[in-house]
């Protein structure tokens, strides 16, 4: 297998407040008015009716949050090919919290017999959404982490089916709440759609899996080690032709800066290999790279590498990564330099 091209590097000598939107001043009076209407209706109702209105108000508030969550899920799925893992997980965890709040309400039971059917439909919708959301998140992460898996397409399709079932059950709930036996809510129930898009489920699943595995997607759990810099001691300077030059010496030490640009820590088995080529036979040395978390870096030092005054050399640092990596092309860095005559 052909060796990857060596990246060359220039030597580094020394490592009004926003305007408030106008509509905000118009929105608050409307919100305050709606809240006042709800308060007046509830306070003026009997004990049983008040309990029913409290229940319906809670369902309505939760449905509003879930509606926003559905919009968030659609936005995230439309960007699977270019988002980071944390963005997907954060969005789905927020929706899961809203679903859990809904389950706490239905577990407590309806306040009257007229809301038994509504409570049952709401429970079924929440259960379907929960199964679908958890399955979708897990399958998308699995698809990104294991590009060879084929079962993830079916898993994503099954999760989408559950989300769609939850949408249909919620639509049935809205119809139930409009029946004569149920006290009418003060304001209409919001629309809630959790399924990310219309269309045939398998086709949607294949598209989402492909997007999650895109080279530009940051969903996959994998490190991104890179050789960021090579520094010499004694320190080199740069001549008029931009050639790094060391003072006359018979030994040089190199500090190799290794960074983790990925979204997960690297394994403990990675090595960085340093090769010094020049007038005599190449000298090769290897050192271990410690475990690095996302965004962390370390310096690996190679001491007393032999050189001769007046010689021309090339030093190459290469990471021997044994696991998946975001970009194998940045695992090697080389510098050509001269050593001054005595």
Image: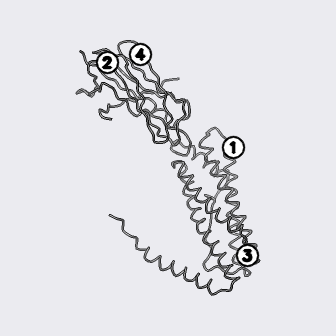
Name the residue that disc number 3 marks: 115
Of callouts 2 and 4, the N-terminal one:
4
Name the residue that disc number 2 marks: 312
Q: Is residue 149 above or below residue 88?
A: above
Whole-angstrom CA distance, mark 1 to mark 2, is 55 Å
Q: Nearer the viewer, mark 1 or mark 4?
A: 4
**Which residue corresponds to the image point at 37% horizontal and 12% vertical from the top-left?**
280
Whole-angstrom CA distance, mark 2 to mark 4, is 12 Å
**Which residue corresponds to the image point at 45% horizontal and 77% vertical from the top-left?**
26
Name the residue that disc number 4 marks: 282
Looking at the image, do the residues carrying marks 1 and 3 touch, with CB atoms under 8 Å apart? no
Whole-angstrom CA distance, mark 3 to mark 2, is 86 Å
Q: Label 1, secondary structure: give it.
A: helix
Looking at the image, do the residues carrying marks 4 and 3 touch, with CB atoms under 8 Å apart? no
Looking at the image, do the residues carrying marks 3 and 2 touch, with CB atoms under 8 Å apart? no
Q: Label 3, secondary structure: give it.
A: helix
């Amino acid at each position: 297998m052909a060796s990857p091209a060596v990246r060359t590097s220039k030597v580094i000598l020394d490592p009004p407040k926003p305007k408030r939107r106008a509509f905000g001043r118009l929105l608050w009076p409307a919100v305050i008015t709606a809240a006042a209407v709800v308060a007046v209706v509830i306070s003026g109702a009997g004990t049983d009716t008040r309990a029913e209105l409290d229940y319906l108000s809670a369902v309505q508030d939760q449905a509003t949050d879930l509606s926003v969550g559905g919009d968030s899920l659609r936005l995230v799925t439309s960007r699977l090919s270019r988002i980071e893992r944390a963005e997907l997980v954060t969005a789905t965890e927020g929706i899961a919290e809203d679903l859990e709040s809904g389950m706490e309400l239905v577990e407590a039971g309806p306040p009257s017999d007229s809301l038994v059917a509504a409570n049952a439909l709401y429970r079924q919708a929440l259960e379907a959404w929960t199964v679908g959301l958890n399955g979708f998140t897990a399958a998308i992460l699995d698809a990104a982490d294991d590009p060879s898996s084929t079962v993830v397409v079916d898993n994503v399709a099954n999760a989408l089916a559950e989300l769609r079932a939850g949408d249909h059950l919620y639509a049935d709930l809205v119809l139930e709440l409009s029946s004569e036996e149920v006290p009418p809510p003060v304001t209409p129930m919001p629309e809630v759609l959790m399924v990310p898009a219309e269309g045939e489920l398998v086709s949607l699943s294949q598209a989402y899996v492909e997007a999650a595995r895109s080279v530009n997607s940051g969903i996959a759990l994998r490190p991104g080690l890179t050789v960021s810099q090579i520094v010499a001691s004694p320190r080199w300077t740069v001549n008029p032709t931009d050639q790094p030059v060391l003072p006359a010496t018979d030994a040089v030490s190199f500090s190799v800066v290794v960074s983790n640009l990925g979204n997960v820590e690297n394994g403990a088995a990675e090595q960085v290999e340093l090769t010094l080529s020049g007038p005599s036979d190449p000298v090769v040395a290897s050192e271990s790279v410690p475990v690095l978390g996302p965004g962390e870096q370390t310096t690996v030092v190679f001491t007393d590498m032999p050189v001769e005054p007046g010689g021309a050399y090339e030093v190459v640092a290469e990471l021997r990564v044994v696991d998946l990596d975001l970009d194998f092309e940045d695992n090697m860095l080389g510098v050509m330099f001269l050593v001054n005559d005595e």
